[in-house]
Amino acid sequence: MRVTLYQLSKYFGPVKAVDGLDLEIAEGEFMALLGPSGCGKTTTLLTIAGFYQPTAGEVRFDDRVVNDLPPRKRKIGMVFQSYALYPHMRVLDNIAFPLKVQKVPRRKWEERARKVAALLEIDDLLDRLPGQLSGGQQQRVALARALVKEPDLLLLDEPLSNLDAKLRISMRAELKRLQKDLKITTIFVTHDQIEAMTMADRIALLESGRLQQVGAPEELYNFPGNIFVAGFIGTPPMNFLEARLKGNELVGEGFRLPLPKGTHLPSTPPPLVKIGVRPEDLVIGEGDVEGEVYVVEPLGRDVLVTLKVGPTMLKALAPPELPLKAGQQVKLDLAGGRLHLFDAETGQSLLRGNDAN
Amino acid sequence: MWKRIRWGWDKAIAYAILVAIAAPFLAMYVGFFLRAFGKGMTLGIVPKEFGLSNFRFLWEPIAWGLGKTTMWAALGNTLAFAITSGLVVTGVCMLAGYALSRIDFKGKNLFLALQLFLHAVPGQVLLIAIFFLLFYIKLLHKIPGVALARASLEIPLGIWMAKGFFDGIPWDIERSAMIDGCTRFQIWFRIFLPLVRPGIAAVFIWGFLFAWHDFIYVYTLLPGTTKLMSTLIQSLLATEVIDYGYLAALSLIYMIPPLSLFVLLQRALLKVPVFGGKGV
């Protein structure tokens, strides 16, 4: 099923939780709603599920407007962050509950519930109560309950955030695989950009109720449309330096750089710009910018170096064989790496190739 | 050494105070049991011999004034009265508590505040109004009618109790049930009621106990020929010669049902959240 959000807004009194959101989720797509807490992603999900009525705008399933359709008639499956299993029912009854409500005959619901349980490898837990299961097992039960009615749309609210770190990584891969096998249109909410990057076909990044950018993970990483997207995607986060435009040069405290390729200045160029450079693109040891090593943190595969350039602190990922010590003066290459350029006032990107967003 | 003696004194004083407070109550209970099982009291509370003759109402009819009844009839009436009241309180409070916990509507907070106000109104104030009300709906002098009136007094606080239990159930469970295809009523019946079983027990006991102990409503609104335990005991007090042993034995029987309910359901009662605490 295709899901379309058209100018979707949801206000709680004076608070604009979601504000004019336009988004289309294609049939079979795995879409992540990503953003910091309070950005409106969960409100959006609950509106799609039908728990909230939009203040303005529309939610469409295929071509049908479903604003007034109650959740129980929407043919959706949902997994909650807390899993929300019914504590008084056995696992089998939990999974089969959506079918029992539809008055599916016993033989049939039992068969279907067992099949889904086998798919999720929880068929040996069917007689237990939810309280006797581990977090990972509870999550599988919740997922089985969402899938048993063969929904048109699957909604996942922070599905991995209650699992321990190791389990989270294996579930990430498993969920992605499962979604591809079942081809159910899926929307999931997360505040963890790594989760969104690794699992989703496309990511919609929200902030303060507004859509910042939507696209494939690589697109958001390589061509962030504004400063917020640039700073949110990628770990460690992108570095920003303030600079002034002087002809074809960027001049800041302690450096002077040529304009990067693909710069697309408006007719009246902004006086102040922000240069963005990712830690993994910063090269230490060559170049014409002077910096001082402030802290060196070994991560194993790389070394995370904090550098001081003029008044600004920069993070860089360096190969571990590089001999670096705190207090050491080093040369830096900013221009050699891939630079991002933003209008300091509006935060919009000044690079060509972002116009599409 | 000095320290130990000193510490002993502290304890002795504490115990002395506690005993002084408890003694009158203990004496009352001891006297009560001695009377119930004793015969021919001397010095007020020392029985000459023990026996079960005070319990003769178990097999003999009880005479009061010119009338006659049996303990079993009174006990049956009281049970019917208290159980009806308990069921009415439970039914109304479980529905209202769910609505007030989960559904948003205009005037909800006013309604809740009003319940507290109603709880503060003494039941006797309403007696005359209830008398006419029951008279016009033809339920006066009938146990179910009076039980209904009695239940209405305990419903306000019972609603708060029930709401507290429903408040303890996470919203995600309710949302999950909606996604799974339930209507609001199905959620209440299939998911919430099983989860608030301690709440159901507590609210039922609430309605049951107050009706069980009630005297004024029963005395005023039921005919003198329909005896409940409380009015039976009262009518035996109104005779010229009072047989205290007989009364004590009767009162002992009167105590058994509420006591056993408490023992059976005490674990549920310990979880009672009256003002919005977590119940489950």
Image (cartoon, coloured by chain):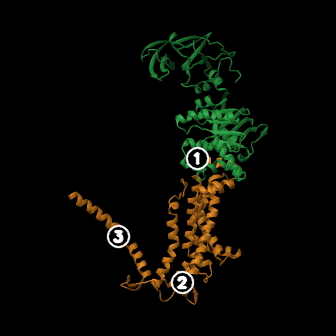
> Can residue A79 be seen?
no
Task: State the residue lying farthest toward the bottom.
Answer: B66
Rendered shade, chain B: orange
- Front label number (1 vs 2): 1
Is B28 above or below relative to B67? Answer: above
Q: Secondary structure at mark 3?
A: helix
Name the image quarter holding residue A143: top right
Q: Residue at left 60%, top 51%?
A: A90
Residue on which disc 3 sits? B20
Chain letter matching colour green: A
Q: Chain of mark 3?
A: B
Where's the C terminus of chain A, which quadrant? top right
Task: State the residue lying farthest toward the right.
Answer: A63
**Residue B235 tag number:** 2
**Left of B211 or right of it: where is B26?**
left
Among the two numbered marks 3 and 2 on one chain, the one whose residue lies closer to the N terminus: 3
Could you say where residue B124 lies in the image, as x and y percent from the top left?
58, 72
Name the amino acid type tagged 2: Ser
**Residue A125 tag number:** 1
Name the amino acid type tagged 1: Leu
Instruction: Tell me the distance, in whole angstroms, between the alpha carbons under discs 3 and 2.
Output: 34 Å
Q: What is the tally of numbered marks visible in this picture? A: 3
Q: Secondary structure at mark 1?
A: loop
